[in-house]
Structure formats: structure tokens, C-alpha cells
Amino acid sequence: MSIKELATYSDEQISRLMFDNNRMWRTQLNFVLAEYDLTASAWAVIRVLRDEGQGCTQKELASSLAIEGPTLVKLLDSLEQLGWIERRVAPTDRRAKTIWLVDRALPQINEADQKLGMARHQIISVLNEDEQAEFGRLLNKVRTNLERMNHEANRNGGIHSRD
């Protein structure tokens, strides 16, 4: 086998690497978040509310996170029980609920975010600065393609067209 063949990954190998890295990344985040009785999935809710704006409806939040409504409801129930979020009646539709971070949870959110930042740094530290930039560029390229494919599938009722 040539050096070029050894350095070439199949799409199946790349897919498996992405899946494994995502799973192990989430495991590391869950280790950090366990101190706060949170999971990576619950943290995703907090991050969206903090970074993209509070007061969205449950339906909007589920769409933003690309998860089903019942899955989000379980996460919100847990976060509400822990005192991290609150649900309020939407001003324009009494049937809808908007989601808000609770002010008293902000210090814990900031603390958890700092610890997550240290974990992210430790995970990525095996790459030098140039490798990190290239890795980020390549991941962004794949994400853009996945977003396009997902948009197309949603438009076509879940069916991907072949290019």
C-alpha cells in the first residue's frame, strides 16, 4: 500500500470519525456539566437562549435546535426544575410559551461556560494554530453542505435529490 493510499480516508471512515468525535466531545462536555446537573443537550438550550436571544417560543426553540417538541419539553422541564429557565405565556398567543433564562442562574451559566471553554481548549490543543484554522474551515464547509442538504430535504418532504 502506498503512502498516498494510507493517507486517504474513505467517506465511511470520515463519517465514523465525525460520529465518534462528536460522541466523545459530548461525553467530555457531560463530565463538566454533571457538576450542574446538566447535559450537553440541556446546555444547547441554554446556549441558544443566551446567544441567540431569549423569549422565543418552544416551537421556535425546537426548530433552532433541530429537535422534536417532546424532546425539548423534557429538557425544558428539567431546566425549569433546576431553576435555570422559566416559561411565560406568549404575549401574542396565550397558548404558546416563551422561554427565558432566570437571572439567578446567570452566575452558574458563566461559571459552567468558563469550565466548558477550558475543556474545549484541552480537546483542541492537540492541533497547532494552522491546523485549528484548517480544521475549522473544513468543518464549516461540511456544515454548509449539510445545511443545504437538510434544507433541500425539508423542501422535498424528506427526500434528498441526487446531484
Image (tube, rainbow, N blue to C red):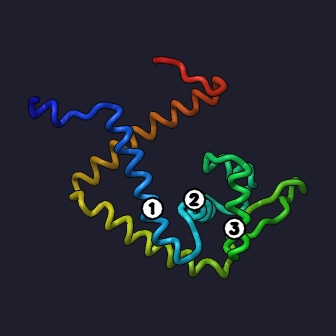
Front position in the image: 80 or 52: 80
Q: Give the CA distance from mark 3 to mark 1.
A: 19 Å
> x and y percent of residue 149 in the render?
52, 30
SS under mark 1 = helix
Q: Give the CA distance from mark 2 to mark 1.
A: 11 Å
> x and y percent of residue 162 in the render?
49, 17
Please tell me which of labels 2 and 3 falls first in the chain.
2
Q: Which residue carries the number 3 mark?
A: 78
Q: How many marks?
A: 3
The quarter of the displayed image where residue 103 is located: bottom right
Q: Amino acid at mark 3?
A: Ser
Q: Give the CA distance from mark 2 to mark 3.
A: 11 Å
In the picture, which quadrant includes the N terminus?
top left
Q: Which residue carries the number 2 mark?
A: 41
Q: Are marks 2 and 1 in contact (CB under 8 Å)?
A: no
Front position in the image: 97 or 82: 82
> x and y percent of residue 140 in the render?
40, 43
Q: Residues within 10 Å of mark 2 (few under 14, many from 20)?
A: some
Q: Amino acid at mark 1?
A: Thr
